[in-house]
Image (cartoon, rainbow, N blue to C red):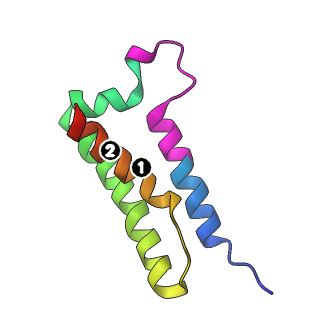
Amino acid sequence: MKANLMPICTNLLAFAYWLYLLDPFKSTPQIRRYKSLLQTKNALVTHLLVATFFALFATLLIINEEQRDIFSFIPLFFIILVVAFN
C-alpha cells in the first residue's frame, strides 16, 4: 500500500500557518499576529490569498483523490472569523 504524502504535507503546512497567525506562544496577547489583519488591508489581502491557496489546493485533493483534507481549511475559516467578529 503506497501512502500519498501530499495531503499530509498540505495539512501540516496549513496547520503551521494557522499557528503562525494565532501566535499562541506570544508573551503579550494584545499584539498577536492575527490583529494585524484588521489594521492594514495589505496584511488582510496577503493572508487571505495564502489561506485561499491552501483551501483551493485541499479542494483539488479532495476532488481528485477523495482525501479528507480538513486542516487546510482552518486558516481561511480563522481569517473569516477574525474579520467577521472584530
Residue at horizontal 26 percent and vertical 41 percent from the top: 44
Residue 44 in the magenta stretch? The answer is no
The residue at the point 50 percent across, 37 percent down is 20
Residue extending farthest to the front is: 85
What type is the residue that disc 2 sits on?
A: Ile
Q: Residue at x 68, y 78 (%)?
A: 4
Q: Quadrant of residue 73?
A: bottom left
Query: Where's residue 53, x and y in %?
Result: 38, 62
Left or right: 44 as drawn, with respect to 26 = left
What quarter of the picture does the C terminus occupy? top left
Tag 2, which secondary structure? helix
What residue would you read off at disc 1? 75
- Are circles 1 and 2 on residues that touch, CB within 8 Å? yes
Q: Nearer the viewer, residue 69 or 56?
A: 69
- Image location (x, y in percent) of residue 51: 38, 54
Q: Residue furthest left?
A: 41
Question: What range of the chain is rendered magenta?
Answer: 16-30
Quadrant the N terminus occupies: bottom right
**Distance from the alpha carbon under mark 1 to that under mark 2:** 6 Å
Q: Is 32 situated above or below 20?
A: above
- The residue that label 2 is drawn on is 79
When the figure is inspected, residue 36 is found, relative to residue 65, above or below; the finding is above
